[in-house]
Image (spheres, grey):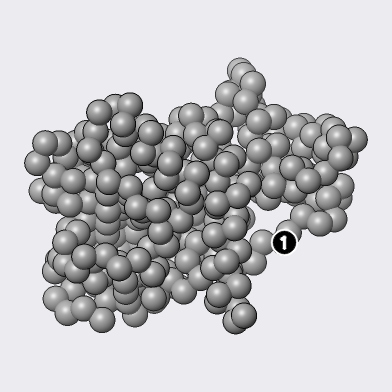
Amino acid sequence: MNDANKTEDEQAKLWNGLGGRAWVDEQELLDRVFKPLETLLVEAVAADTRRQVLDVGCGTGSTTIAVAQVLKPHGQSIGIDISEPMVAAARARAEREGLAVRFICANAQEYSFAPARVDMIISRFGVMFFNDPVRAFANLRRATTDNAEARLIAWRSPAENPFMTTAERAAAPLLPNLPARRSDAPGQFAFADRDRVHSILERSGWSGIDIRPVDFDCTVPEKDLVRYVTRLGPVGRVLDETDDETRARVIDAVLPAFDPYIDAGTLRFQAACWVINAQAGPSRP
């Protein structure tokens, strides 16, 4: 198996296994935390005349469904994600709200989209996990109409997002099997390098590329901190396989590391992100 296929299999295993189930279980918490980012994307759709919007890496569907509310009754909101449990949760949410939202469970890098149908692509933290991002964005370009727009949000660097790595830095001495983050691998910070992101988009048929740093103010209720630490991210995944004694020691070590973020019962932090805009050029790769 080559490295690309191995990486793709790892992502599929993660998001169809423990990682995907954790996001489903904690969807309400995560949707509250990242509501400011969703709002930016929904406002971009509302301010435009785009009628066919594709949400890449849609997860449990919060942003896809919010866009559907804006587009109804004349547009269509479509979500795509590799995670079966998250897509199932998204479909159930749309059904409960009586919305005709289409959700596709597939890898957007490989999926055979109908050509030249989508006129806007959005993503909230869903585009950093492709094992071949140039190939993925070329595939997305083929799905779009000429002059379609992409509006994407991705994380900047770990150094600019200390809150996001607080748990693993505190837990590292107690969890020797905690996986190291690799800047060149699919994952949360895979789009940290602005020049790399620009190159990916340019090489895959996108133009008018604008990548701007934006900091979003986010909050987590202090009462939800244990859930956040033990269910999500690298620490949460490792804790799922540890014994109770180690788990308790890790929690005791990690929770005080978040004290600098706590203010009157609420954790407050800034999500340091790129807001990425691009347009589909007249010719497809």
119 vs 5, nearest the viewer? 5
Seen at 38% across and 33% down, the residue is 92
Provide residue 109's location: percent of width, then percent of height.
39, 68
Q: Residue furthest right?
A: 245
Up-down: is 204 above or below 126? below
Seen at 55% across and 75% down, the residue is 5
Q: Quadrant of residue 283?
A: bottom left
Provide residue 167's location: percent of width, then percent of height.
71, 43
48 vs 79, nearest the viewer? 79
Provide residue 149's location: percent of width, then percent of height.
21, 60
Seen at 73% across and 59% down, the residue is 179
144 vs 41, nearest the viewer? 144
Report the amino acid beneath label 1. Answer: Ala
Quadrant of the drawing holding the N terminus: bottom right
Residue 153 visible (yes or no): no
Q: Quadrant of residue 206?
A: bottom left
164 lies left or right of 82: right
Residue 243 visible (yes or no): yes
67 lies left or right of 107: left
> Callout 1 environment at 10 Å: few (<14), some (14 to 19), or many (20+)?
few
Q: Residue furthest top?
A: 264
178 lies left or right of 95: right
Up-down: is 192 above or below 133? above
